[in-house]
Image (cartoon, rainbow, N blue to C red):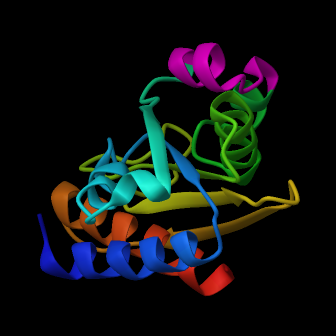
Amino acid sequence: MDEELINAATTLGELLSATSLTVTTAESCTAGWVGSALAAVSDSTRFYNCGFITYTDAAKQRILNVSPHTLATHSAVSEATVIEMARGVRSLAGDNIGIAVTGYAGPDGGDDGTPAGTVWFGWCLDDESVCTSQKWFRGNSEEVVRKAALYCITELTRIL
């Protein structure tokens, strides 16, 4: 695993542990990279309980309770969807924080014209508020996934 990603996850893990917060992840385009980075941190069971890879719309609906209407109206790569993913995974796992990532890593973008490299992030916090962010990352699929996972972890550290 990438050293920069592990360092960022370690920083987040220390913050979560110090504040007795736990997280769970719901990942689409990053396919588990955020969860893998968190799990690679020493003593990660103090703050990371579980993660879900919900790559398809059907998985988002079935596992995270994302509304079919939301997906049909806004698409899987949207603020509305990432909010429902973050709330859904937090509720499902019972952790303090739900992390959600959905996007188009590439090489193709969305049928709606959304370009490859577009990623939405959602963090459902302990007070049930949801912070969101949308970023566009340049690079091939693996570079987009790495950059998205790194951003997701470092941005949650900043939010907390």
**Horizontal and vertical percent position of residue 110:** 47, 42
Q: Is residue 107 left or right of residue 126?
A: left
Given residues 49 and 108, the one toward you in this image is: 49
Given residues 80 and 26, the one toward you in this image is: 26
**Horizontal and vertical percent position of residue 131:** 75, 67
Rendered position, 36 above or below 136? above
Stretch in magenta: 58-69
**Horizontal and vertical percent position of residue 19:** 65, 74
Rendered position, 129 above or below 110? below
Instruction: Name the residue furthest bottom.
Output: 158
Given residues 74 and 58, the one toward you in this image is: 58
Q: Is residue 105 left or right of residue 79?
A: left
The N terminus lies in quadrant: bottom left
Residue sitting at x 27%, y 65%: 41
Residue sitting at x 49%, y 59%: 119
The quarter holding residue 92 reads top right
Q: Is residue 27 visible?
A: no
Q: Is residue 4 visible?
A: yes
The quarter holding residue 11 reads bottom left
Q: Is residue 55 left or right of residue 88?
A: left
Given residues 26 and 18, the one toward you in this image is: 18
